[in-house]
């Protein structure tokens, strides 16, 4: 990692995305997010919010344009380097993507294990994080035995266990009640205060208005500054 | 006492729970069983050929036709003279006329017990043993024989032995090719099993990929499981082959087969067989590793 702080954590320049030979579902995206910023992405269902996040967490390459993360042009990075670079990005998936055969502890520990951290080193860290998300008493529970809110918090714990520079969350409050949603917002604000760059894709207008962070609105595959009035 | 009980670590991709993990060891076992039998056959036949080759390379046979002398006594004298001449030739360790008893024993299966007594034009034989590496100059001996006893025939066994050795080595190579094809079939089986597992666990693999797992990390999960399955299958197959060979060896013991290949293994041959489970494990592991890396390259 370079000591020099890049001007932007995320920079999209004329980015477009299409699946196979289909039409472009995202086009002419120009985005520049400063390090440590907190950004909402909103838009109607099918507007391309998840696809935009997929580009950010390097699940797929853009069809055109250039994506730069923390000063690195991802189109020029070697495959091996991309794997290591992804460890700087935490993702909270809309469907959680927890591994059902693993316990809460093992799911949260997974990014550390993948990064080669030894069990003795990661134990305390994982325990601490599960306590932080209020699941210290459920470390041995497997996802099928947990509620949607508990799964969501495990997914968040897994996303931040590596202390990522960039945290992406896709509809993080979509599956939880208001009480849990409020708790999640508190977690995101705390991460923001710690310097993490956050990009949250959501439909939740109450969430957006409560936190008062900038909003990117997606409509017809392109970005606009503000969502249309309710 | 620790602050909390650490859950038992589980592999990130639960490959051991797949149906293929229960089925593949038996397929590998069958292949290792066949490979072990083919390997033993190839090794034993090659060893037997070596024995025949060295046994016959050191000898020649000279035939003295009965027509070379007018009376049996004269023929005996002629045989002794030729034998003495051959014994003095360079590269020859000994040249002994075959006694009437040995000739009679050789002819008995075809002509009955009184073949020598009958009035038959039976040639006399001289058993020539060669010195050193057993590669005496056959042409020189033939020339000496033509001068000393025109009409005598020198049989080096070489032409017959060469044809036999060529035939048997073709059998050995057939067995080796069979082992190669069995290995190729095992590779194809592991490739299909690996691709099936990838399809079953695609979600977990994509997740690992997105949280920063390298291709090596993901491939290692498949490689280790494939090695375990291949090794286990190899052990089962080897046990089956050992049992089969043991039963065959027991059955062959009563036959006292001088010309049949022995089923007793040398230390080196035993080590080759004992290494089959490891070889099948390594082959399965390497195949799974390469297969999964090729599939992963389709991801960003």
Image (spheres, helix red, strand yellow):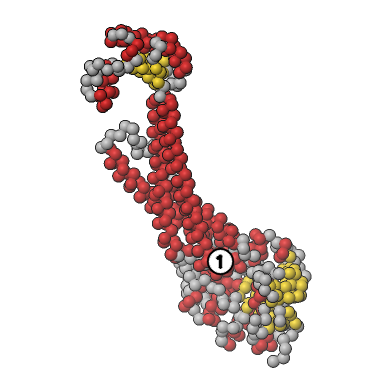
In percent of the image, x 36 and y 8: which residue is there?
Answer: B81
Where on the picture, by quarter, is residue A184?
Answer: bottom right
Task: Mark 1: give few (<14), some (14-19) or many (20+) Cα within 10 Å.
Answer: some
SS at circle 1: helix
Which one is in front, B172 or B66?
B66
Q: Which quadrant would residue B49 be assigned to in this image?
A: top left
Residue B112: x and y in percent read 23, 24
Q: Is residue A132 left or right of residue A16?
A: left
At 64% from the left and 77% from the top, the residue drawn is: A50
Q: Which of the 4 quarters of the picture holds residue A4?
A: bottom right
- Report x, y in % for residue A97: 55, 73
Q: Residue at x 56, y 83 (%)?
A: A175
The quarter of the rendered structure image containing the C terminus of chain A is: bottom right
Q: Residue at x 40, y 24 (%)?
A: B157
Give how far across and how far down residue A90 sits, in percent: 63, 71
Give the labeled residue for mark 1.
B205
């Amino acid at each position: 990692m370079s000591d020099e702080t890049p001007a932007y954590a995320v920079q999209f320049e004329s980015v477009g995305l299409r699946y196979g030979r289909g039409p472009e579902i995202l086009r002419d995206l120009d985005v520049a997010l400063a390090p440590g910023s907190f950004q909402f992405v909103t838009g109607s269902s099918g507007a391309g919010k998840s696809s935009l996040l997929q580009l950010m967490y390097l699940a797929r390459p853009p069809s055109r344009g250039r994506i730069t993360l923390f000063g690195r042009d991802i189109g020029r990075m070697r495959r091996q380097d991309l794997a290591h670079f992804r460890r700087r990005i935490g993702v909270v998936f809309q469907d959680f993507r927890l591994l059902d055969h693993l316990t809460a502890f093992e799911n949260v520990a997974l990014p550390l294990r993948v990064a080669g951290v030894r069990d003795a080193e990661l134990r305390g860290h994982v325990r601490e994080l599960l306590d932080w998300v209020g699941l210290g008493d459920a470390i041995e529970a497997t996802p099928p035995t947990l509620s949607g809110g508990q799964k969501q918090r495990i997914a968040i714990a897994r996303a931040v266990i590596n202390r990522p520079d960039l945290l992406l969350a896709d509809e993080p409050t979509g599956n939880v009640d208001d009480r849990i949603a409020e708790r999640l917002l508190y977690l995101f604000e705390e991460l923001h205060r710690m310097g993490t760059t956050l990009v949250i894709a959501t439909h939740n207008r109450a969430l957006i208005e409560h936190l008062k962070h900038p909003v990117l609105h997606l409509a017809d595959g392109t970005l606009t500054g503000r969502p249309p009035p309710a | 006492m620790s602050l909390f009980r650490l859950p038992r670590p589980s592999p990130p991709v639960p490959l051991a729970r797949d149906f293929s993990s229960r089925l593949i060891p038996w397929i590998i076992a069958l292949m290792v069983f066949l490979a072990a039998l083919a390997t033993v056959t190839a090794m034993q036949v090659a060893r037997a050929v070596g024995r025949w080759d060295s046994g016959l390379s050191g000898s020649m046979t000279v035939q003295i036709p009965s027509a070379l002398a007018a009376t049996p006594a004269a023929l005996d004298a002629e045989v002794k003279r030729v034998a003495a001449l051959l014994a003095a030739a360079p590269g020859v360790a000994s040249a002994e006329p075959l006694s009437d008893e040995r000739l009679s024993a050789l002819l008995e299966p075809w002509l009955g017990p009184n073949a020598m007594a009958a009035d038959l034009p039976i040639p006399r034989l001289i058993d020539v043993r060669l010195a050193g590496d057993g590669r005496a100059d056959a042409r020189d001996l033939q020339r000496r024989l033509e001068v000393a006893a025109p009409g005598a025939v020198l049989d080096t066994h070489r032409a017959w032995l060469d044809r036999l050795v060529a035939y048997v080595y073709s059998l050995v190579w057939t067995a080796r090719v069979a082992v190669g094809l069995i290995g190729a079939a095992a590779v194809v089986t592991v490739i299909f099993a690996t691709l099936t597992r990838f399809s079953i666990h695609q979600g977990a693999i994509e997740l690992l990929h997105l949280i920063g797992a390298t291709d090596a990390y993901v491939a290692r999960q498949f490689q280790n499981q494939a090695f375990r399955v291949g090794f286990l299958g190899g052990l089962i197959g080897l046990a089956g082959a050992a049992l089969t060979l043991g039963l065959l060896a027991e059955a062959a013991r009563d036959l006292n087969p001088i010309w049949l290949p022995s089923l007793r293994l040398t230390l080196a041959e035993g080590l080759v067989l004992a290494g089959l489970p490891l070889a099948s494990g390594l082959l399965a592991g390497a195949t799974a590793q390469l297969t999964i890396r090729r599939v992963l390259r389709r991801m960003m």
